[in-house]
């Protein structure tokens, strides 16, 4: 649980994304693409889920990538090598079904790019032709481009403002690709909910199998609480033990959006308090 | 005969504004007076009501002699956690129901029955203050290693039993803290955390090692544990998965399982938000659905959150049957009522409704009457036509039961489970279909009480001890 490495990947336009290398030989041995861990920063902390992005078997470490959006992710972003997480447990959730599908297309938006990386690597190693589409608002917010290059046969980039790659949304490029390449067997996507629901719309039209990795709120992460319940094809599922990956065409996106906002007010309150404290200390 | 000594309780209004303990326990004088009421029956039947068979007559006798250390040792011979059981055991259904003062055939203890649980608690608390000297009493099984999965009541009890024989026990716990349901489920006002921590420290004194943040089945498989030199594995996995009613609107914001609501508050300390970072919805109008201890706990927690936030308390329990059929301890029902929890009995929730933001705003219910008894022997609620009504609510907590946690069994197909996902065991040895893997507690046969879980854990521990003793004999040949 000792943090042994830290790299700030993005720090502009009020967006901070940090990569942490955490010592955990146990997790390193077991982590598979698509799985996640539960993390606590301190004894008073929340438990939050984070995707296992990478592992380094020589060092016995795993990589976590976190975008600072709420209180806990900000605390994580402020941790330094030498600090220890209060809790780290996993690997949780079903691994991505890695096999040779033929041609697969992965779509990553924002910090979701971090989550498609281990899946892309796994699918590439299994012999697939891997096409990755990654996107962000602007060039400076794009992460893991270099890491994705060697595991993609084709890497396409979209920025909302056209500062890098194509001036487009990832889903625009997705549509174009699905039109061009008739043999895409699977579309795997992770990103903001509006992006994933749009991917679902596009892939439904093209009748292509579409998997998404959902980011529901969790408490224990082991099936005990049901906080992460989502509606999949009119059935309630727990993201932690039934997922985190589901058929994109079956997800009730509106419900997920609303459930993820339940604690918005409390989150704003604690973030403001924390800022005040931080400013006071200066 | 002398009169029943009532236990002192914190003032209902004051106590429901904090998470401080409600039942204050006996003073020495009170304990002596209550113990003095015990008839010391020639053929006592009270112990038959105790799932672990504590020698009740004997420990009460020691109290009357003011030999509290001996009383404590007597209880500890059978029960590893007297300070916990003295607080959370449903004594009115168990030892007190078996007491000779209870009318024969009564579903729960008469008021006159000796307050055995309060005496047990008195003894434990007295010894907790003085410190105890518990050590591995029979080291003949040193050198053997047993893995216990889950640091809840069953796992901790099994660990304690084995450690006393000198077995090296490692408990693997999935959460970041110990105690299982005793910490995430039972609120501190029923079981203060210092009591729980005391009992866990007693365990550590026996050289039991506890590793948190470790999910057997994920972090390591059962097979790998054996490969690493563990001679046996005990599964105290608990009944982890909450059931839901399966009615419309259940996934609206503000609708919780009792497990989530209680975990946020008890384990994650949401009542100290923002000092502790986990939030919980307080709710102006709270409904809690169910009639068990968990429902009472959730309602009393919700009410406290309301009062501590300066809101007008409004928490209502919705239950399909009448108070008589409620599975909760009578004391919890009384306490909830004293504190201001309201009860809507004979009502069945049909649907939740929400606002534009997807947050729950009301619940629709039907009124019921009791019909013929069902398989559980309780009279079945039957809905009355045209009786539907709506109640405002911005927090709803469903406390309608739990199912098996399958996180381990799903990846360990050698361990047979029944159609509910509960682990199938030999009822004598508690051994599963996988050799040298034993199980006990709620993962066997569904939800039960803390003491029942301990009873099963002890049986499993006994079987493990017997097996290890045999192995030791083989070694020496």
Image: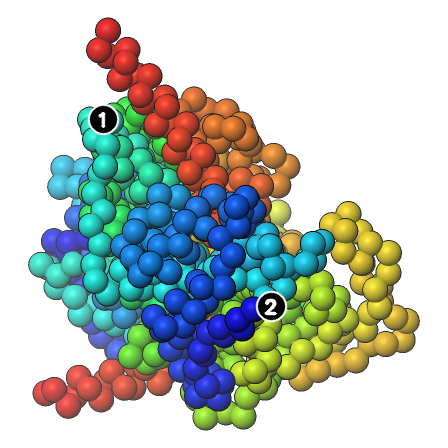
Are discs 2 and 1 located on one and the same chain? yes
Quadrant where the image shows the N terminus of chain B: bottom right
Residue B111's tag is 2
| Letter of the chain that mark 2 sits on in the rendering | B
Q: Residues within 10 Å of mark 1 (few under 14, many from 20)?
A: some
Quadrant where the image shows the C terminus of chain B: top left
Task: Using the image as rendered, state which of residue B420 and residue B1 is in the foreground.
Answer: B1
Task: Using the image as rendered, state which of residue B359 and residue B170 is in the foreground.
Answer: B170
Q: Position of residue B442 (x, y in %)?
A: 51, 46
In what element is the residue under mark 2? loop
| Letter of the chain that mark 1 sits on in the rendering | B
Looking at this view, name the residue that lies furthest to the top: B477
Is residue B29 depicted above or below A198 in this figure?
below
Is residue B209 depicted above or below B117 in this figure?
above
In what element is the residue under mark 1? helix
Q: Write down the residue under mark 1.
A: B140
- In the displayed structure, does residue B344 sit left or right of residue B143? right
Q: Residue at x 27, y 60 (%)?
A: B127
- In which quadrant of the rendered view does residue B120 lie? bottom left
Q: Position of residue B405 (x, y in %)?
A: 50, 46
């Amino acid at each position: 649980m000792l943090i042994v490495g830290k790299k700030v990947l993005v720090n502009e336009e009020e967006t901070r994304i940090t990569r942490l290398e955490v010592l955990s030989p146990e997790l390193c041995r077991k982590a598979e693409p698509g799985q996640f861990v539960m993390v606590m920063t301190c004894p008073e902390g929340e438990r939050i889920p984070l995707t296992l992005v990478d592992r380094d078997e020589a060092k016995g470490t795993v990589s976590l990538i976190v975008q600072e959006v709420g209180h806990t992710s900000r605390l994580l972003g402020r941790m330094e090598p030498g600090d220890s997480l209060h809790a780290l447990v996993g690997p949780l959730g079903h691994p991505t079904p890695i096999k040779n599908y033929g041609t697969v297309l992965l779509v990553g938006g924002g910090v979701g790019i971090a989550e498609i990386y281990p899946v892309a690597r796994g699918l590439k190693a299994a012999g697939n032709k891997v096409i990755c589409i990654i996107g962000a608002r602007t060039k400076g917010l794009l992460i893991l481009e270099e890491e994705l290059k060697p595991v993609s046969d084709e890497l396409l980039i979209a920025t909302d403002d056209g500062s890098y790659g194509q001036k487009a949304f990832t889903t625009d490029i997705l549509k174009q690709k699905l039109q061009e390449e008739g043999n895409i067997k699977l579309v795997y996507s992770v990103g903001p909910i509006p992006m994933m629901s749009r991917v679902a719309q596009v892939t439904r039209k093209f009748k292509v199998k579409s998997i998404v990795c959902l980011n529901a709120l969790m408490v224990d992460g082991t099936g005990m609480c049901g906080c992460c319940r989502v509606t999949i094809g009119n059935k309630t599922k727990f993201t932690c033990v039934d997922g985190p990956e589901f058929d994109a065409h079956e997800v009730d996106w509106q419900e997920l959006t609303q459930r993820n906002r339940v604690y918005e007010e409390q989150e704003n309150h604690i973030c403001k308090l924390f800022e005040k404290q931080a400013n006071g200390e200066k | 005969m002398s009169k029943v000594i009532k236990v002192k309780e914190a003032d209902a209004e004051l106590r429901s504004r904090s998470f401080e303990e409600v039942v204050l326990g006996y003073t020495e004088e009170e304990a002596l007076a209550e113990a003095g009421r015990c008839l010391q029956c020639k053929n006592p039947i009270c112990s038959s009501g105790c799932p672990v068979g504590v020698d009740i007559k004997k420990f009460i006798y020691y109290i009357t002699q003011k030999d509290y250390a001996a009383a404590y040792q007597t209880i500890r011979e059978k029960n590893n956690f007297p300070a916990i059981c003295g607080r959370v055991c449903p004594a009115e259904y168990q030892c007190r129901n078996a007491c000779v003062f209870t009318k024969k055939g009564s579903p729960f203890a008469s008021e006159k029955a000796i307050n055995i649980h309060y005496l047990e608690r008195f003894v434990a608390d007295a010894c907790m203050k003085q410190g105890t000297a518990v050590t591995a009493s029979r080291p003949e099984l040193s050198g053997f290693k047993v893995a216990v999965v889950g640091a809840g009541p069953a796992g901790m009890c099994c660990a304690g039993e084995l450690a006393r024989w000198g077995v090296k026990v490692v408990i693997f716990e999935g959460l970041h803290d110990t105690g299982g349901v005793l910490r995430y489920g039972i609120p501190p006002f029923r079981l203060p955390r210092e009591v729980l921590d005391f009992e866990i420290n007693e365990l550590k004194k026996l050289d039991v090692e506890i590793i948190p943040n470790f999910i057997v089945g994920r972090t390591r498989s059962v097979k790998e544990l054996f490969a690493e030199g563990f001679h046996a594995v005990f599964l105290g996995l608990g009944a982890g998965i909450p059931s839901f009613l399966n009615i419309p609107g259940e996934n609206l914001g503000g609708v919780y399982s009792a497990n989530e609501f209680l975990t946020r508050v008890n384990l994650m300390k949401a009542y100290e938000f923002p000092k502790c970072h986990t939030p919980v919805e307080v709710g102006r109008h709270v409904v809690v659905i169910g009639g068990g201890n968990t429902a009472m706990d959730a309602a009393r927690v919700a009410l406290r959150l309301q009062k501590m936030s300066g809101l007008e308390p409004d928490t209502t329990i919705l239950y399909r049957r009448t108070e008589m059929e409620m599975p909760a301890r009578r004391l919890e029902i009384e306490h909830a009522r004293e504190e201001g929890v309201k009860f809507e009995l004979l009502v069945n929730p049909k649907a939740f409704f929400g606002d534009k933001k997807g947050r729950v705003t009301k619940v629709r219910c039907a009124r019921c009457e009791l019909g013929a008894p069902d398989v559980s022997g309780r009279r079945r609620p039957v809905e009355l036509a045209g009786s539907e009504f709506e109640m405002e609510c911005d927090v709803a907590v469903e406390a309608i039961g739990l199912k098996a946690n399958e996180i381990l069994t799903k990846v360990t197909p050698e361990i047979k489970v029944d159609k509910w996902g509960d682990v199938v065991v030999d009822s004598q040895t508690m051994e599963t279909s996988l050799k040298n893997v034993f199980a006990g507690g709620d993962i066997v046969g569904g939800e039960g009480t803390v003491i029942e879980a301990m009873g099963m854990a002890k049986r499993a521990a006994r079987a493990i001890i017997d097996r290890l003793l045999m192995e030791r004999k083989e070694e020496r040949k």
